[in-house]
Image (cartoon, rainbow, N blue to C red):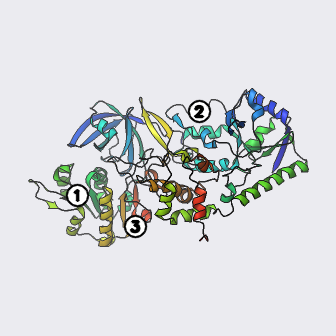
Amino acid sequence: MQYLSINKEEWDKTIEQLLLSYTIFAAEDNEFGIDYEIVIPANINRISYNRAKPATSLKTFFLPVKENVTTDPSVKKQRIIIGAPNCDIHGLRILDEIYLDKDFNDLFYRERRENTILISIDCFEKQPHCHCTSYGIKPWASDDADLAAIMVDNLIILRVISPRGENFIQQFSLVKPLNDEKVISVIEKAHNTTESLLLETNKGLPDYKATGTIVKEAGREIWKKYSAKCVSCGACATICPTCTCFLLIDKEGFEKIKQLDACQYPGFQRVAGGEDSLFVLPERFRNRYMCKYVWKPEKFGSIACTGCGRCIEACIGKINKNELFIELAPGRS
Amino acid sequence: MINTKNIYKPLRAKLTEVIDESPLIKTFVLVPEQEFSFGTGQFIELSVDGIGEAPFTPSSSPQITDKLEVTVMRTGYVTEIMHALKPGAFMGIRGPYGRGYPVEVFYGKEVLILGGGCGLAPIRSLLYALEHIKDNLEKVILCYGSKTPTDCIYKPLFSRLNSIEKFEAYRTVDRSDDEWDGSVGVVTTLLNRIKIDLKNSIAVVCGPPIMMKFGTIRLLEMGYNDDQIYLSMEKNMSCGLGKCGHCMMGEFFVCKDGPVFRYDEIKNTPDIWK
């Protein structure tokens, strides 16, 4: 893996220069934690490095909550996103499967994917519900992103991940190859520490393969028990990096507005005449688990839960899906 | 090669004729502004400008490409407004979507079609397609059931079918009226009177979920194998593109992987009859 470095001050100036030709979004520290903000010269110094995930998932940049999909899909200005953790980068795989499929390519999604440079960050910490490693995802990116940015002392270290990332970074003369073994060992040590911490704090949590079997075999009582506090608000699906369901709303002139939807909303599968196979709450609740842990992996061969833990954080009923999986873990009496 | 077409944009189609089929059912004759063709059993998303869209399988012949017919039952918000449209109005069409009936697989076979209620609309399109290739078929039998005699649309269709060589059509009703002198009973009762070479047959089932369920069970009892039965599934197909998630049935997107499935493909999928 190729590492490059640049002085933090110079990196900030580089970002300021890039603002002339790119729209840049970055994960920034704010009073509530970390979330994406649009970068302007005044907030470049608030870009967060080495921290765990932003509150919002990466999907928002590619699948807006609401958009007119009968307009011109072209992206006017190229974009850079700084600060996506590896869990979210991984989440894009299933989005690509669905939105870039060979039969029906979504031009709006494709334009955004092709015109966005993804600069991931390495997580040198974990948040309470992070459990990416349980599903085979490392807390740092080694594929699917273009670059990864890490801060070590007063240096920004850039790990080159894709050819596009390599081309992009070549234009900056102040970015030099990193040959300091000490810095690389600081990064590797931080990787190991975070990974160990994630594994240790998620001991007993079944891995992704096991979750599918657990969900398939779980009885009605489990779904009744865990859905008892669900108010069908759809927060879990809205915040999820891999939930992509939507609704098409008609506007005059045969225009279509595409709006994010959630299978947790009543009426999601209602057909003309009123039949609704997900009318009963425990069945609707179960549907999301079946989709994430059984159907999507079967259909796309790709995981549909990245272990980011946002659904647990967002749930106003304090439903913790990991508690469900631990309760049903194989070997647990 | 990547398709650069905007998959969400409807094609405008002029409504040229509205045919009253029953108090609740009308057939809309549409002339698209651009070339449009479909395979029998595929569906379209038909929209009323600014109101909404809903999935329908065209009921006309797939061989006719300058216009298409869509039979619509008034059953909800969008179809209520559709029923108020007059000739001259413009509607939106997206599609055609999904896997239709694989008529090429039917060559050399006896085709049994089991239909119920509104299922007759897609079946009519299939019958036109089969009529077109009748020289390559052994036999086509339609068994159709409706709740009452007045619920049955396309009435002249039955006498016409019975006049076509190799075609037979039978009707039954759940509840008769004073004028009805035909069969009374659920559609599966018609299966007792047909003669079919099971080994060289395929069956098509299309209708309401409850009829599809018991129709399939009856066909299996008769000796049909799972891979001889084709089902036209009905879910909330909203985008038609395998993306929006509304029509998921297990791991299948009914809109893209279906709506026509062979029974062996889905028999282990939970809740298929819901």
Residue found at x 90% / y 50%? A182
The answer to which of B71 and B166 lies nearer the viewer is B71
Question: Residue B227 got which mark?
Answer: 3
What amino acid is at disc 3?
Answer: Asp
Q: Residues within 10 Å of mark 1 (few under 14, many from 20)?
A: many
Question: Residue B145 got which mark?
Answer: 1
Question: Residue A168 got which mark?
Answer: none
State the residue position of label 2.
A74
Mark 2 to mark 1: distance in Å? Answer: 51 Å
For the question of whether residue A307 can be seen, the reply is: yes
Residue found at x 28% / y 42%? B74
Where is residue A292 shown, x and y percent of the image?
Answer: 55, 55
For the question of whether residue A302 can be seen, the reply is: no
Chain designation of label 3: B
Where is residue B81 shown, x and y percent of the image?
Answer: 31, 35
In the image, taking residue A63 as reference, residue A182 lies left or right, namely right
In the image, taking residue A160 as reference, residue A98 lies left or right, namely left
